[in-house]
Image (cartoon, rainbow, N blue to C red):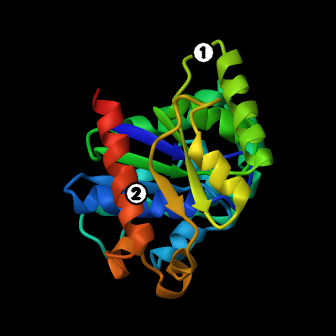
Amino acid sequence: MRVFATYNIKGGVGKTATAVNLAYLSARDGARTLIWDLDPQGAATFYFRIRAKVKGGGRKLLRGKRPLDVTIRGTDFEGLDLLPADFTYRNMDLDLVQSKKPTRQLARLLLPLALQYDYLFLDCAPSISLVSESVFVAADVLLVPTIPTTLSLRTLDQLDRHLQERRTTRPRLLPFLCMVDRRKSLHKRICASPHEHHPEMLQTVIPYSSLVEQMGLRRAPLPAFAPLAEPSMAYESLWTEIVNRLSL
């Protein structure tokens, strides 16, 4: 099982849209796919029409008193399951600190799922915290949606430096530009040379589109209700590029 985490220190950059759309495309292509909504806001859970509630809350999950597999729910899409969010996840840092080797707890919890799924997507809340440190241990790949602005690129630099300073195994960093509006001169300029400071940047660019916002109204992944729209095709291209990049 390969573990992806959609992650950024900043909020509002398209992490949940990325997790939901890529997980859908993964399952559509025949891979057994699970998405775990780690954000207490529960947006990914909402998109899949599932109640954001976990029996016993996040504490029982993290302490292993409630196995993950009994909490998993099926979605409306074949091959795609969801581990819902819960508002108690807001206390996940406090729950983790009480565990032995807290940064490895998420990875330990995910081990029993390795034979059930091909891909697992972790939809992460924006932060640098004990939870994110646990995600860095559990994930094979960090997918980092990055808006083409100076501050967003600075945040990406901070994340890159932080990962480089880690003494333990670190996940592969795959950033990509998203919410791109080529009418803006800064967006256009950054898109013209995205690899100047970040050679690992993926080629695919996700455009800004009101269709992405309609995911909340439709409560469905974008490619499921608008497969031929420009942003849907962009997510298709992004998923293909990720799979190809990791197979090299």
Q: Residue at the spot x=41%, y=61% of the render?
A: 234
What residue type is disc 2 on? Leu
x, y percent for residue 91: 76, 52
Which marked residue is nearer to the observer: mark 1 or mark 2? 2
Residue at the limit of the structure toward the bottom, as seen here: 217
Looking at the image, which is closer to me, 203 or 60? Answer: 203
Q: Where is residue 69 in the image (x, y as percent from the top left)?
A: 39, 53
In front here: 126 or 147?
147
Q: Which residue lies furthest to the left in this view?
A: 30
- Residue 125 visible in this rendered orientation of the protein: no
Q: Quadrant of residue 13?
A: bottom right
Q: Is residue 129 left or right of residue 28?
A: right
Residue 168 — which label?
Answer: 1
Q: Which of marks 1 and 2 is nearer the N terminus?
A: 2
Provide residue 110's location: percent of width, then percent of height. Answer: 44, 39
Compared with 117, 47 (above or below) is below
Looking at the rendered image, the quarter that the C terminus falls into is top left
Residue 62 shows in this picture: yes
Determine the image quadrant of residue 103. top right
Q: Which amino acid does label 1 sit on?
A: Thr
As measured in the structure, the alpha-carbon distance from the residue carrying label 1 to the one carrying label 2 is 28 Å
The residue at 48%/35% (across/down) is: 141
The residue pinned by badge 2 equals: 22
